[in-house]
Amino acid sequence: MQNGEKWLDFRDQMPVVQEWAYLDHAAMAPLSGPAREALREWCDDATENGDVNWQKWRRRIEETRSAAASMIGADTDEIAFIRNTTEGVTLIAEGLPWQPGDNVVSPAGEFPTNYYPWYNLKSRGVELRLVPAEDGRVSLDQLEAACDDRTRIITVSWVGYTAGWRHDLDRLAEIAHARGALLFVDAIQGLGVCPIDVRRTPVDFLAADGHKWMLGPEGAGLLYIRREHLDRLRPLGVGWNSVRHAGDFTNLQFDLKPSAGRYEGGSYNMGGLLALGASLKLLLQYGLENIFRRVMQLTDLLCEKLQSCGAVVVSDRSEAHRSGIVAFELPGQDPLEVRRICRRAGVVLNCRAGRLRVSPHAYNNEEDIDRLIAALTV
């Protein structure tokens, strides 16, 4: 399949394009066509047959796990399913064996999900150290200087939600590990469009809900726990599905699964995870490296056209730090009013930190960008 045909095919898998120039994946993605079909199939079966085919759906959940592992270069036993990123952050924050006087280091200006669970450790004598950052940009020298021999975790968003600054995870892992600390990554604004291989980039923990760049529904996400750290964590939320003999309800032996699956204490969000799995398979079909190149081409074009109509692009567009998020300002115009105008024109974008924010995916095209520019210049 030629490159142009590839993206036309991807576009055909996204029913949202029939109505909208959808440029808001950093907030919430539309479901892919395959995700919709997976959800419908499960819903129809559950409605018509109850639990008769439960084992079939349970096997397909493992296909979702395999797709998630493949996407980041992990093993399947290092992947746990979670309801949202907050749950993933909390499982790590509350599971580590903290001692009074320990500290966590993070850039300032993180999304609250990657702030509150760490701040909540204050009652256990753990300090949260925030390093100055502007629009996600942080000096790694300053971040490194904030660490000491009591630093247990460096925690960052892979991609900043306000302006799209993409962190150098390789360098952050080096900084953390040189201090004997671990690296936690809130990956929700990168995973699904930015490639990562956790065997090459040794992050220790990574969490992301699937409802943004992975084109899944809310309430279905993934948590990566590097295998060597599993037994360092206190298991939380344990239940019938946390043990090796899950499903044998008469066996009460407390024998936890030797995998990240021990955190999946109870019943799955079956429909949500099946839908997520369908979208992950779709993304893997096109390849994350290809998707990333495509999104960078689209956002470069977007920045060029925005600047030509008088917009001020705020996002860092250097090769090392650019992402699928473009934040910009229209001098003299109210961002909320501009968003309303765009919505009436069939263009979906968003506002963050007093600016407009656009976040296209690989299925978007130049026509979508032109619709945005036309709406901005009426």
Image: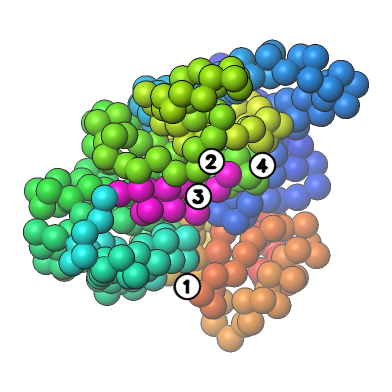
Q: Whole-percent x and y of residue 342?
A: 72, 65
Q: Which amino acid type corresponds to the residue marked 3 in the rendered image?
A: Glu
Can you identify the residue that label 4 sits on? 217
Residue sitting at x 75%, y 30%: 39
Few, some or many residues within 10 Å of mark 2 (<14, 14–19, 20+): many
Q: Classify 143 as above or below 197.
A: below
Q: Which amino acid type corresponds to the residue marked 4 in the rendered image?
A: Pro
Quadrant containing the C terminus in the rendered view: bottom right
Q: Which amino acid type corresponds to the residue marked 2 in the rendered image?
A: Ile
Q: Is residue 37 visible?
A: no
Q: Whole-percent x and y of residue 348?
A: 69, 58
- Kindly identify which numbered label has been placed on residue 82: 2
Mark 2 or mark 4, whichever is nearer to me: 2
Q: Are marks 3 and 2 in contact (CB under 8 Å)?
A: yes
Q: Which amino acid type corresponds to the residue marked 1 in the rendered image?
A: Val
- Kindly identify which numbered label has been placed on residue 312: 1
What is the span of residues highlighted in magenta in the rendered image?
83-96
The residue furthest bottom is 332
The residue furthest right is 48
Closer to the N terminus: mark 1 or mark 4? 4
Q: Are marks 3 and 4 in contact (CB under 8 Å)?
A: no
- Real-space CA distance between mark 1 and mark 2, rounded to the nearest whole angstrom: 38 Å
Few, some or many residues within 10 Å of mark 4 (<14, 14–19, 20+): many
Q: Whole-percent x and y of residue 62?
A: 55, 20
Can you identify the residue that label 3 sits on? 87
